[in-house]
Amino acid sequence: STLGLCRESVLAKQFDDPLWKRDSNLGSVDNWDFEQVTKWALEKKNIPDEVAQKLSKNKIKGYELLLFGREDLKEIGITRPGTLTRVIGAIDELKNSHLGNVILVEQSTYCFGKMIDQLRLHAMCELDDELAPEPSIREPAKKRFKRVVDYYFPGDESSSFILGR
């Protein structure tokens, strides 16, 4: 896929996240029933199975899970400090990566569109062993474009083909 051309980019990592590879029937975390919450907990490598069992026993739903804090976890019997930290981290990760199925992208559709166009050009030129031409960016948007590219594609190699450096 175009977004995965630069494996170390924020976009590649975001769209390669295991949450994107799940069955679409899981839907938004807000709509998960307790069985889907249990399935999520069982699939997380850093969460012990006992946590999934406690979430299931207490019939914790998705919208409830997103509101959980340390005290809530303690209330359902998860008390070990290390486990609490791992579960809170996983819940935060879930919140940040799923956000109701919305991916937050740079607000400037112009800059993001130019970046995607450049990735497509790069993919096409790669087939012929050519370098993609440098993108043509409007003067008022150049600073923002550079900032967007530097954010989504940290590192020399990734930024170089988009910015033509």
Image: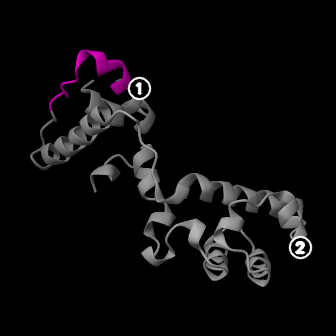
Quadrant housing residue 122:
top left
- Which residue in the rendered view is the most extreme toward the left? 128
Name the foreground residue: 101 vs 82.
101
- Disc tally is 2
Please indicate whether residue 60 sits to the left or right of residue 121 in the image: right
Q: Which residue is mark 1?
A: 147
The residue indicated by pointer 2 is 77
The answer to whether residue 157 is left or right of residue 13 is left
Q: In front here: 53 or 129?
A: 53
| Image quarter in which the C terminus is found | top left
Residue bounds of the magenta highlight: 133-145
Looking at the rendered structure, the kind of residue marked 1 is Arg
Give the percent coordinates (x, y) of residue 130.
12, 38
Give the Cα separation between the discs numbered 2 and 1. Answer: 45 Å
Q: Residue at x 42, y 38 (%)?
A: 152
Q: Residues within 10 Å of mark 2 (few under 14, many from 20)?
A: few
Residue at image position (74%, 62%) is: 87
The disc, 2 or 1, on the residue closer to the chain's N-terminal end is 2
